[in-house]
Image (cartoon, grey):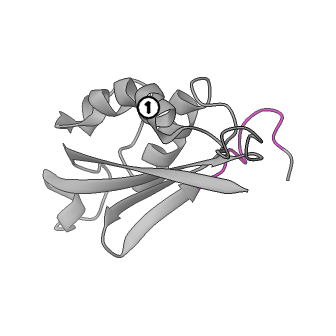
C-alpha cells in the first residue's frame, strides 16, 4: 500500500542558460505543491502505514529551508528546475522517512515531476 502527505511552499527562482526572452530566465516564483509518498503495510494495531503527523514532523525542517527562499541559493539543489527540486527533496527526505517511495512536485497546476529514486546508488530498475 502507498500513502501520501501533501506539502506546499512558496519560492522564487530563475533558470540559467535559456534562450533570450524565455520567461523562465527572469526572476519569478511559484506556489509549489509536493506529495511525499510512503509505501508499506498497515500496522495491525494502528491500521496505519505511517502516522501522517510523523511524516509532517520529519519533513518540516526540509520544507522550512525552501519556503520563501530564492531556490538558486539553496545549497545542494543545483538548477532550480522542478525535476531537480524533486531529486533534492528525495535526497533530503530519504534518511528521515522510512518507506519513502516517491516525491511529486507541482510547480504549476498543470506541470510537475515525480522522482522515485531511480538514479540513486543501489536503485533497482
Q: Can you identify the residue that label 1 sits on?
A: 59
Residue 119 appears at what percent x and percent y? Answer: 71, 44
Where is residue 25, by image quadrant? Answer: bottom left
Task: Indicate whether 53 appears above or below 103.
Answer: above
Count the labels in the image.
1
At a point 39% along the width and 71% down the height, the residue shown is 111
Q: Nearer the viewer, residue 60 or 85?
A: 60
Secondary structure that dominates the magenta span: loop
| Screen quadrant of the N terminus | bottom right
Where is residue 71, by image quadrant? Answer: top left
At a point 66% along the width and 39% down the height, the residue shown is 46
Where is residue 24, by image quadrant? Answer: bottom left
Q: Is residue 114 magenta?
A: no
SS category of the residue bearing label 1: helix
Q: Is residue 119 magenta?
A: yes
Residue extending furthest toward the front: 45
Residue 113 appears at what percent x and percent y? Answer: 49, 61
Residue 44 appears at what percent x and percent y? Answer: 77, 42
Q: Is residue 8 left or right of residue 79?
A: left
At a point 30% along the width and 72% down the height, the residue shown is 109
Q: Is residue 81 left or right of residue 32?
A: right
Q: Is residue 86 left or right of residue 6?
A: right
Q: Nearer the viewer, residue 98 or 66?
A: 98
Q: Magenta segment, which residues?
A: 115-123
- Crowdedness of circle 1 by 10 Å Cα count: few (<14), some, many (20+)? many
Residue extending furthest toward the left: 27
Residue 69 appears at what percent x and percent y? Answer: 20, 34
Task: Indicate whether 110 appears above or below 61.
Answer: below
Amino acid at each position: 500500500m502507498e500513502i501520501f502527505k501533501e506539502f506546499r511552499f512558496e519560492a522564487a527562482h530563475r533558470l540559467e542558460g535559456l534562450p533570450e526572452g524565455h520567461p523562465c530566465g527572469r526572476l519569478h516564483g511559484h506556489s509549489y505543491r509536493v506529495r511525499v509518498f510512503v509505501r508499506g503495510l498497515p500496522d495491525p494495531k494502528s491500521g496505519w502505514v505511517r502516522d501522517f503527523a510523523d511524516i509532517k514532523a520529519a519533513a518540516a525542517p526540509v520544507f522550512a529551508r525552501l519556503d520563501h527562499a530564492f531556490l538558486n541559493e539553496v545549497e545542494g539543489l543545483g538548477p532550480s528546475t522542478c525535476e531537480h527540486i524533486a531529486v533534492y527533496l528525495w535526497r533530503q527526505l530519504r534518511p528521515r522517512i522510512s518507506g519513502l517511495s516517491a516525491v511529486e512536485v507541482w510547480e504549476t497546476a498543470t506541470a510537475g515531476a515525480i522522482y522515485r529514486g531511480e538514479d540513486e546508488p543501489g536503485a533497482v530498475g
